Amino acid sequence: MLNRVDSKKQHNKIKFSLSALVIVTTLFTSATAFADATLKLSHNQDKNHPVHLSMQFMADEAKRLSDGGIKIRIYPNSQLGTQRESMELMQNGALDMVKSNASEMESFEPAYGAFNVPYLFTDIDHYYRALEGEVGKEILQASKDKGFIGLTYYDAGARSFYAKKPINTPADLNGLKIRVQPSPTAVKMIELMGGAPTPLAYGELYTALQQGVVDGAENNPTALTTARHGEVANIFSLDEHTMIPDVLLISSTVWDGLSPEDQKIIQQAADASMQHHKTLWQEMTAASMKEAEETMNVQFVTVEKKPFQDAVKPIRDEAINNPAIAEYVKQIEALK
Ligand code: GCU
């Protein structure tokens, strides 16, 4: 007879094997589906998140432009793995497309690290000049020899702190465990501000906040509603330390295997979805803030940014001396 601990272990094992089986089955069909050009795209957001909706727009557009020839099936909510796992699956040929965030991408392609420099952008127009300009395109192409390329960016807003108390100055982070994306620069940023960084996958964050594994996190306001973080951390302090876009990526093997016409269609659909996302993002961020205030009792706090900017200045100074990103950072700064 199993004792309770063993039976729980056994239960977890079965649960794990079942989810592993679902992933393996899905990925196995991926190989077969590849022949009839159904591309599988994995990401970590809910279906009601603006980035999911914009990627669905991209998939519909690719289907329309190819008269139904190109099919892209989207798997949301980390069903096929975290962002990191999805990237690895794509590099191994088991997945065709992935949406990740430029922050986490610095471990796969250092060029994306340029976006991790805090307070790099002066405003939204500057941000878009970089994303849509030469420098943005160069970064998307930089990973060619690493098994994938970027197709487009999606606005992911400005990231700020949220916790059960206001973060008015970096000193308020003292002794707080702050969840960050798995990215060396994000870890460094929290250390410089005086907090204790805890890298975690996005899907684990709600429970981590609820159980006090972390005291706070940092993200854009849509996380409060689409991932319900506002239920477990309801003071959002608008220090807006970074603007780090989401990125739509495709496997180089899949890309190289497409006809030039299909490549053109997919690129066109991706570009159109980025434009579509521009307005959708603004509208849905405003709606999220309103919903968070009205239904979750979230409070948005305005803070003075200068002390935060001063604390993280060493990241910009290091970036300018880091050959992997210096040129990109300078190009972005020249677009101010
Ligand atoms: C944002 C971003 C996601 C990212 C998440 C995170 O929501 O759009 O791509 O995974 O932040 O903090 O992990």
Image: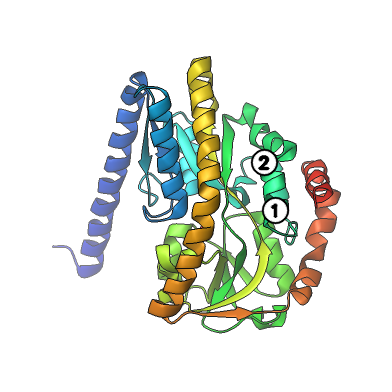
Q: Is residue 95 visible?
A: no
- Marks 2 and 1, how far apart in space? 10 Å
Q: Is residue 9 above or below residue 258?
A: below
Q: Residue at x 49, y 47 (%)?
A: 83
Q: Secondary structure at mark 1?
A: helix
Q: Residue furthest top?
A: 259
Mark 2 highlights which residue? 132
Q: Indicate the position of residue 272 as horizontal and vertical percent values.
A: 52, 37
Please give left or right for residue 121 compared with residue 44 in the image.
right
Amino acid type indicated by mark 1: Asp
**How many labels sit on residues?**
2
Give whichever of discs 2 and 1 has the lower sequence position.
1
Characterize the local packing of mark 1: few (<14), some (14-19) or many (20 or more) Cα atoms within 10 angstroms: few
Q: Residue at x 53, y 23 (%)?
A: 264
Mark 1 highlights which residue? 125
Residue 178: assigned label: none
Q: Residue at x 71, y 59 (%)?
A: 123
Q: Are marks 2 and 1 in contact (CB under 8 Å)?
A: no
